Image (cartoon, helix red, strand yellow):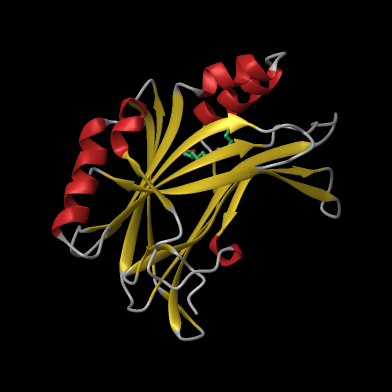
Amino acid sequence: FNKSVIGLSHLKLIEFSGFLEKRRDLEIYHKHLFLHLNTHDYFSDGLNEEFESINYKEFGDKFPESDLMWSLQNQEKTSICSSYLVKYWVDLNYIIEEGVSAIYAVTNIFESPEPMTISCSTKVCSFGNQVVEKVENEHAQYESGRYVYRFENSPMCEYMITFINKLKQLPEKNLKNNVLENFSVLQIIKNNDTKEILLTLAYVFEVSTSEHGAQHVIYRLTNT
Ligand code: G9O
């Protein structure tokens, strides 16, 4: 029974989270999750059939088209690449008290049956164009019969921190969602030795209501 369903057998996503760590001193700290996706929350037969498919054209204007097309063409040609769209409802319901330091960060965890070095490119896009890109490399760590890649507590860039702070200050949910209409994040994970694309993750956002907290829905991305 395979519970890790984002990705194919070559590489799977285990966790993606974006968070704010508030620290008053060494002893007292609090982690606020803007969003959190843990694939162990899902159950599947491993065939990736449980996610509804969505055509990339429905979201095509939100991402650099050449990147998405390249991933989807690879997906058609090879059996090692898969693409997903995740819509997040982000939780912006937090307060940063005076005298408290705030660290904004992202965690990505992947796993594979064979060891590799992988690269993870994260592109922040505005109106479908790349604004900033971060590329990180990670070697495989053997853990309980599989290889794990941990990109943990990776600090967010100034652009993202400013964006989140400005978004939070907007007075109404509708205004926040209007801004988020033109904001997206694209992650492309490659085998660093062969340069083959293994996984493409396209993220779009709305704000959640305070009662519901962070939520998400996952789709398989196709070009058919
Ligand atoms: C709209 C609010 C989103 C809150 C969390 C977003 C998490 C995903 C952002 C990842 C971008 C990190 C890229 C980066 O810092 N590059 O330098």
At horizontal 63% and vertical 44% (from top left) the residue drawn is 215
Query: Could you tell whether 86 is left or right of 37 in the image?
Result: left
Q: Is residue 185 above or below residue 174?
A: below
At horizontal 34% and vertical 72% (from top left) the residue drawn is 9
Q: Quadrant of residue 60?
A: top left
Out of 146 and 56, give the one closest to the viewer.
56
Out of 171 and 107, give the one closest to the viewer.
171
Out of 155 and 51, give the one closest to the viewer.
51
Q: Is residue 23 above or below residue 141?
A: above
Q: Is residue 127 above or below residue 190?
A: above
Instruction: Report x, y in % for residue 65.
Output: 24, 32
Instruction: Report x, y in % for residue 90.
Output: 63, 36
Question: Quadrant of the image for the C terminus?
Answer: top left
Query: Could you tell whether 97 is left or right of 4 in the image?
Result: right
At horizontal 39% and vertical 28% (from top left) the residue drawn is 125
At horizontal 23% and vertical 47% (from top left) the residue drawn is 72
Of all residues, the one furthest to the left in this rendering is 77
Instruction: Report x, y in % for residue 142.
Output: 45, 81
Of all residues, the one furthest to the bottom in this rendering is 145
**Count of numbered tags:** 0
Out of 112 and 98, give the one closest to the viewer.
112
Instruction: Report x, y in % for residue 98.
Output: 85, 29
